[in-house]
Amino acid sequence: MRARRFTRSDRVATGNTSEVFRWTSTTVVKVLRPGIPQECAAQEADVARWAHAAGLPAPAVDGIVEVDGRPGIVFERIDGRPMWDLMQATPSELTHMVESLVGLQASLHAAAPVGALPSLVVRVRFKIEAVTALPAEDLAESLMLLDQLPIGSALCHGDMHPANILMSSRGMVVVDWFDAATGHPTADLARSSLLMRPPMSSRAVSAFLGGATRAFLTRLHDTYLDTLIARGLHDAAPFATWEAILAVARLAEPVAPGDLSNVWAAYKAGPAATAATSRTSSGR
């Protein structure tokens, strides 16, 4: 590792677990936030390297460095804007871009798994066992449901949403392979649905899909679900079960628990409540 310090002006992106800074004229560096296990950098670098070598739309990896005492992954710099920025700039193109996102996600599911990816089910189980925001009986129930679902062997990105897709001259490039795993495609689609859900409170904002109104986020989420249904990718019962389980697992991440707990509570209340929360304010 070689050390280097950055200022705020060097930052180009930020997330729950990392920050991205300019590194050279052709590269950026993704630096883990304090408290994130250092081995996560090497793990993500390996996954991204495998994906890129397999010809998948992932940036090339140029090694591991140290920034302010934290590990960082050096990636090639992609000349393009996030799909999320373009959706907000040209809302008339939102449906077309969501269709492109779903097509990209389906193509990853159809690709051969790359490298020694972890099991999505094992990872979800590990997260649920670390949750402290729900009663023990809820955690036990979510684990029981997890055991009843198919494991699957598809390549699941685990964090697919418009802010993690760069629209470049060479096409769409997917970034942030931190949560990649092998699992069932429905689990990956349900995770994306969970990430794109609008906040239930009109005063809340999305942690990573910033700059948009709740109405715009609702439109995005509804369009995503409609596109899955149109493509035959939305099997309602297992989709709802996966989304509820993943909501519980996400409570182990550094996010606000309110909406996630509500997703789980709605699932337990039955199909009608789940349907009502899945399309929060669309009236459908």
Image: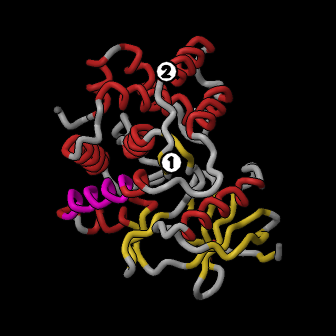
Pointer 1 residue: 158
Q: Residues within 10 Å of mark 2 (few under 14, many from 20)?
A: few
- Left or right, 224 with respect to 172, comes to left
Pointer 2 residue: 148
Q: Position of residue 131 (x, y in %)?
A: 64, 27
- Left or right, 36 with respect to 186, comes to right
Snapshot quadrant of residue 63 = bottom right
Circle 1/circle 2 CB separation < 8 Å: no
| Image height of 168 relative to 100, above or below | below
Q: Position of residue 221 (x, y in %)?
A: 30, 45
Q: Which mark is residue 188?
A: none
Q: Is residue 31 visible?
A: yes
Residue pictured at 34% horizontal, 39% vertical: 202
Magenta run includes residue 209: no
Residue pictured at 36% horizontal, 52% vertical: 106
Name the dominant secondary structure of the magenta segment. helix
Residue occupying the far bottom of the picture:
25
Distance Cα–Cα, label 1 vs label 2: 20 Å
- Magenta-highlighted residues: 93-106
Q: What type is the residue that disc 1 sits on?
A: Gly
| Image height of 76 relative to 15, above or below | below
Colouring chosen for the image of the structure? secondary structure
Residue pictured at 58% horizontal, 19% vertical: 139
Residue in front for this viewpoint, 65 or 153: 153
Quadrant where the image shows the C terminus: top left
Q: Position of residue 90 (x, y in %)?
A: 23, 67
